[in-house]
Image: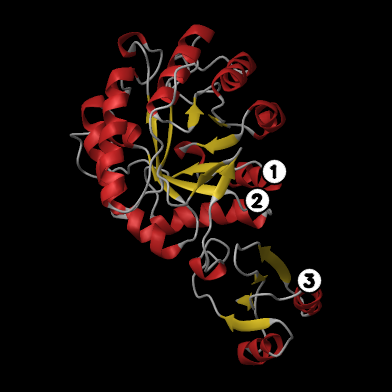
Amino acid sequence: MVIIMKLGATTIELDAVMAAVSESGFRPFLNPGVERKVVAVLGEVDIDKVELMDRFSNMAGVERVQLISEPFKLSSRHAHPGPFAVDVRGVQIGGTEVVVIAGPCSVESEEQLLATAREVRRAGARLLRGGAFKPRTSPHSFQGLGEDGLKMLAAARDVTGLPVVTELMDAHDIDVVCRYADMLQIGARNMQNFSLLRYVGQTRHPVLLKRGPGSKVRDFLMAAEYILAGGNTGVVLCERGIITFEDAARYTTDINAIPILKGLTHLPVILDPSHSTGNWAWVQPIALAGIAAGADGLIVEVHPDPQHARSDGKQSLKPKRFVDLMAACGRLANAVDRTMAGPAESD
């Protein structure tokens, strides 16, 4: 159940509604909308729903009360009917601009990271990605540089101005990762690590949540629900391919998921064409398909020397190919009434 406040409802009226929800034995959760406030009523409803709705509907400042049948209460579009964007150090994900996050899969060295950061910034990327802690299939593969990698990401941000997105794998690392990063990435392998999601929900860092390769859309939204339930409303969803019987590409890109998610949730939705294809040659066409389907952004892997990358070199674009990708995406964004950042001035 959600209680939608009137435009211009006062703080006193909102506080009275929140108190009434608590007094009724439920937990009120405030969704801070741009145009109007929405209070989600959390808990098991074991009393007459009509009576409860009438009770809240008649309170001052309330426009209407609406039942939500979906199990994902807080991520439902009903819980936040107005415009919504996630702010990452001044960059808005979820507005009219298609936001591109780019950088190497792994932070390998200061030289590699800074060179890549400068290139993607010049091409129009708005955020820098890079893995300091790397989840790998084999324990013998490169696992990342840890805090040294985080320091390199922060230094690259200082030079380029690009906010940093990096993966958090373990709740024990939350403090150190939050110290350096502007946005926490929860990888596909941890999408249903509910303990980690709860911890992330207690932070106020924006979160990029990737869909697990074997997860349904509703599983994905329920994972987001764990973060939102902790009070962290800054969640961005990332479609990055799912497992099907087809093995021609690394995963099957679920383009359907983009408009489906956009219809079910107010949370911004971006696409990862690098992981979903596993091959640089297919990144651009899938990225374009994502924008055409309504994606709010892309996260793309870029490396100055993919052949010698320590992880995911096969799917990484060289800087020149990334420039071409950005130009093509910009043309398409204009055709679907969206915008994209153009090339930036050289450092």
Question: Along the horizontal axis of the image, is 1 left or right of 13?
Answer: left
Question: Along the horizontal axis of the image, is 135 left or right of 216?
Answer: right
Query: Mark 2 near mark 1, Cβ–Cβ under 8 Å?
Result: yes
| Alpha carbon distance from label 2 to label 3 | 21 Å
Amino acid type for the residue under numbered disc 3 = Thr
Q: Residue furthest front?
A: 345
Q: Around disc 1, counting alpha carbons within 10 Å, would you say few (fewer than 14), some (14 to 19), or many (20 or more)?
A: some
Q: Residue at x 71, y 76 (%)?
A: 9
Q: Which mark is residue 203?
A: 1
Q: Which mark is residue 173?
A: none
Label 2 or label 1, whichever comes before in sequence order: 1
Q: Residue at x 46, y 10 (%)?
A: 112
In x, y percent, where is residue 275? 34, 33
Label 1 or label 3, whichever comes before in sequence order: 3
Depth check: 284 or 174 in front? 284
Question: Along the horizontal axis of the image, is 210 left or right of 88?
Answer: left
Quadrant for the N terminus, please: bottom right
Q: Label 2, on which residue?
A: 232
In x, y percent, where is residue 159? 57, 17
Amino acid type for the residue under numbered disc 1 = Thr
Label 2 or label 3, whichever comes before in sequence order: 3
Amino acid type for the residue under numbered disc 2 = Asn
| Alpha carbon distance from label 1 to label 3 | 25 Å
Which colour assignment does the render follow? Answer: secondary structure
